[in-house]
Amino acid sequence: AVRAFHSLNYRVLAAGDSFNDTAMLEEADAGVFFNAPANVVAEFPEFDAVDSYDALAQRLKQLKEG
């Protein structure tokens, strides 16, 4: 899905919660873990991690603004 959006010249901000989302987060222009287990967050320190909807909304807004 991320590649399809990129092919349409969209910028992609993605949020995921576990290992199965890491490829999507890597492919996106910016990725954030949401409510991910501590071991997943520790294994992928290149992604920000948040634990609440408010924090997710704030982080995505920051990423969107550049």
Image (spheres, rainbow, N blue to C red):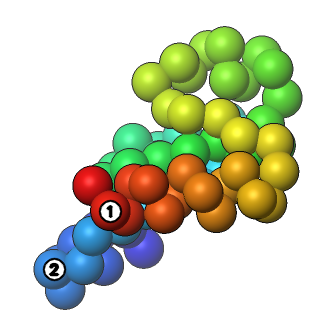
Q: Could you say where residue 6 lies in the image, as x and y percent from the top left?
A: 23, 72
Alpha carbon of mark 1 to alpha carbon of mark 2: how far?
Answer: 17 Å
Residue at 56%, 45% in the rendered image:
32
Looking at the figure, which quarter contains the C terminus?
A: bottom left
Name the image quarter holding residue 12: bottom left
Residue 9 bears which disc, if any?
2
Name the image quarter holding residue 46: top left
Q: Could you say where residue 38 lies in the image, as x and y percent from the top left?
A: 81, 20
Vertical position of residue 1 compared to residue 18: above or below: below
Residue 65 bears which disc, if any?
1
Residue at 39%, 42% in the rendered image:
26
Closest to the observer, 19 or 38: 38
Asked whether, in this view, residue 7 is left or right of residue 58, the answer is left
Vertical position of residue 7 compared to residue 27: above or below: below
Residue 3 bears which disc, if any?
none
Closest to the observer, 24 or 54: 54
Marks 1 & 2, CB-CB < 8 Å contact: no
Name the image quarter holding residue 13: bottom left
Q: Is residue 17 visible?
A: no
Looking at the figure, which quarter contains the N terminus?
A: bottom left
Residue at 61%, 15% in the rendered image:
43
Q: Nearer the viewer, mark 1 or mark 2?
A: 1
Residue at 71%, 24% in the rendered image:
40
How many labels sit on residues?
2
Q: Residues within 10 Å of mark 1 (few under 14, many from 20)?
A: few
Vertical position of residue 18 compared to residue 12: above or below: above
Q: Is residue 55 visible?
A: yes
Q: Helix or strand or loop: what does disc 2 sit on?
A: loop
